[in-house]
Image: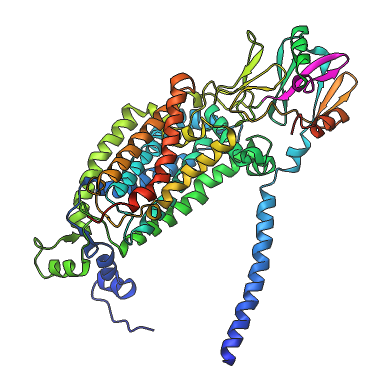
Amino acid sequence: MAHFTKATSVKDWLNQRLAVEKLEKVMASEYWIPKNINFLWAMGMVLVITFVLLLVSGIFLLMYYVPTTAEAFNSVNYTIMREVDFGWLWRHVHGVAASVVFLIIYIHMFTGIYYGSYKKGREMIWISGMLLFVAFSAEAFSGYMLPWGQMSYWAGMVITNLFSGGSLHADGLVEWIRGDYVPAQAFLGRFFMLHVLLIPVAILGLIGLHFGALRIPHVNNQDGEEIDFDAEAKKYLDGDKAGSKVMRFANDFMSKDMMVVGVYLVFFFYLVFYNYGFAMDPVNFDPADGLKTPTHIYPEWYFLWSYEILRPFNIDLGLILFAFAQVIFVLLPFLDRSPNAIPANRRGKAFAIWFWLMLANMIVLTAMGKLPPAGIFSQIGLVSAILFVVQWIALPFITAREKKV
Amino acid sequence: MKENSRRGFMGKAFGAVAGVGAIGSLVAMKKTWDPLPSVKAAGFTTLDMSIYQEGVMVTEKWRGKPIFVLKQTAEMLANAKKNPKDIERLVEVDGSHYMVCIGLCTHLGCIPAFREAKNDFKCACHGGEFTASGNVQKVPPPRGFDIPPFKIDGGKLVLGEVGPEWQSMKDNGVTL
C-alpha cells in the first residue's frame, strides 16, 4: 500500500487518494488548445451542452411516460403536456434539442471536413464522431417511436421494412425486429428500452472514445498547422504566454467556448418557448392507426438527405445507395488521398469545388426529400442523388492528383 | 515455461467456458426478441365473402395488417381477363371474383389509397401505383400486392391458413 500522511486540508486528503490536482491538470489547465481557431471550434461544447439538455429533460419525461400502445399517446399528450407542472417544458426542450442537435452535428462535421480535421493522426476522431452520428440517429429514431402517433407508427413500419433487404424478402428478420407482424406492443417496448438505456449507454461510451481520440493528435487549427504541443506548452508555462501558439483548455479556452454556448442557449430557448412547432410534426398528434397511412410520410429534416437518396430508385438499388450514403462518410479519411491537411479552399480548385458542391447538394437533397415525389422535384432529387454518389466515387481520384501545398 | 503452459491452459479453459456461455446467452437473447406465442396464435381471420359489394373496396384486418378486399365488377373482371397476370391473382368464391391482398405497398409498407375514379391504388409515400387486381402499374414497388395465405371454406375465406388455391399461387410465383 502506498504511504498516506495525515491530511492538511480536504484538498490534500483528496489529492492523496484521487490525485485530483494531477487530474485537473491533465483534463483542464494543462490540456493545450491552439490559439488559432474560431467559433466553429466551440461546436463540440455546444453538443455536450445539448446532450446534457436531452439527458435532463429525458429524465423528467421518463417519470411520466408509459411505454404501452394503449397509454403511450395519452401519457405524452395528456399527462405530460397538461397534468404535469412544466411537463410541456421538458417535452419541448427534448423535442427541440433532438432536432437542433443534428443541426450542430452537421455544422461540426462540415467544419471537420473543411479544415481537414480527419487527417494526419486525427482519423480516429473522425471515425468515433461518425459512430456518434450513427448512435444519435438510432437514438432519434427510437425516441420518435415513443409518442405512438401516426408518424411514429408509420416511420417504424417503413424503417423496419428496410431490413427485409428489398428482393431478399427477409420478412422473418423484420418480424423478429418488431416482435410482431406489425409494430405493436413488443416493438414499442423494445424501442423504449433502446431509447432510454442501451443507446444512451453506447453514446456515453462513444463520447469517451471521441474525447480520448483527441488527446494525442490534439485539436486542429484554422491553418492545419502542425504544432509541437510539448514545445509550445513549455513556452507557455515558462511565461511566454503571448508567444506560445497554445493556451489552457480551462479556464482560458472554456471561457470562449461558454460564450458561444451562451449565444446558442439564447437561440435554443427562443425556439423552445416561441418556435417549437418545427420539432413537433402535426401528423404525430393523431394516435397510431395501423389501418391508415398519413398522406405524406417523411422523416424529420435531418434524415431527409439520405431518404431522398433512397426514394428515386427501385427498391434494391435504392437500398444499396441508402446503405452507401450511411457509411460513406466514415471512410472519408481513407478516401481523401491528398497529402494536404489544410482548409478546403487552399487545397486547389478541385477539392474546394468538391466541398462546396457536397454541402450544397446535401441541402438540395434535404429540400427535395420534404417535397412530394412528383414532377420536377422527382427529377431534381434523382440528379442530386446521382451527384452525391458520383462525388464520393470521384473523391479518391481528385484528391490523389492534388499537389502538396 | 511450466508456469506459462499452466496459464495458457487456464486461459483456454476460461475461453471455453466463456464461449459456451456467450453462445448460450446469444440464443436466449435472440429468442427473447421472437414474436410471442400469443402474437402468433392470434394470426387467423375469417371473412364472410357474401357481404361484399361489387366495386366497393373494403379494408379488413389480419395480423395487424390491412387486407384489401375488392369484389370485381364486370368491367374490372373483363379487364383482368385480358391479362393472365391479372386474372391469376383473383380469388374465386361462389362464382364471384375478389382481389384479396395485404394492403401494404411492397416498396416500404405504406398503405396505398383506393382511387374510385380510376379504379386503382396509389401510395402516397413514394408514388407507387397498383391496378384493381393488385399488380404494379407504376414503380418503385417491386411487385404486386402480396396475397395472404388463405383457405376457401364454402362461402368463407380463412386468412392465415394455407389452402390449395393459395399454394398454387405461391408455387406459380403469383405471390411470395
Which of B121/A167 is in front? A167
Residue A331 is situated, as x and y percent measured from the top left of the image, at 42, 52
Note whether A132 is above or below B109 in the view shown. below
Magenta-drawn stretch contains A307: no
Image position, residue B140 (x, y; %)? 58, 28
Residue B36 percent across, percent down from the top left: 72, 43
Q: Considering the image in quadrants, where does the C terminus of chain A appear?
A: bottom left
Q: Is residue A197 left or right of residue A89?
A: right
Would you place residue A139 above or below residue B134 in this image?
below
**Residue at the spot x=78%, y=14% of the render?**
B81
Q: Hey, which residue is sitting farthest right in the picture?
A: B154
Q: Position of residue B83 (x, y in %)?
A: 75, 18
| Rendered residue at 65%/54% (across/down) | B29
Residue located 32% across and 48% down the image? A113
Q: Residue at 38%, 36% (x, y): give it.
A: A362
Residue A112 vs residue B127: left or right?
A: left
Q: Is the N terminus of chain A in the top left, top right, bottom left or bottom right quadrant?
A: bottom left
Q: Is residue B58 visible?
A: yes
Is A281 left or right of B72, judged from the image as shown?
A: left
Q: Nearer the viewer, residue A385 or A273?
A: A385
From which residue to which does the magenta span run? Answer: B85-103
User: Which quarter of the figure has residue A364?
Assistant: top left
- Towards the viewer: A185 or A174: A174
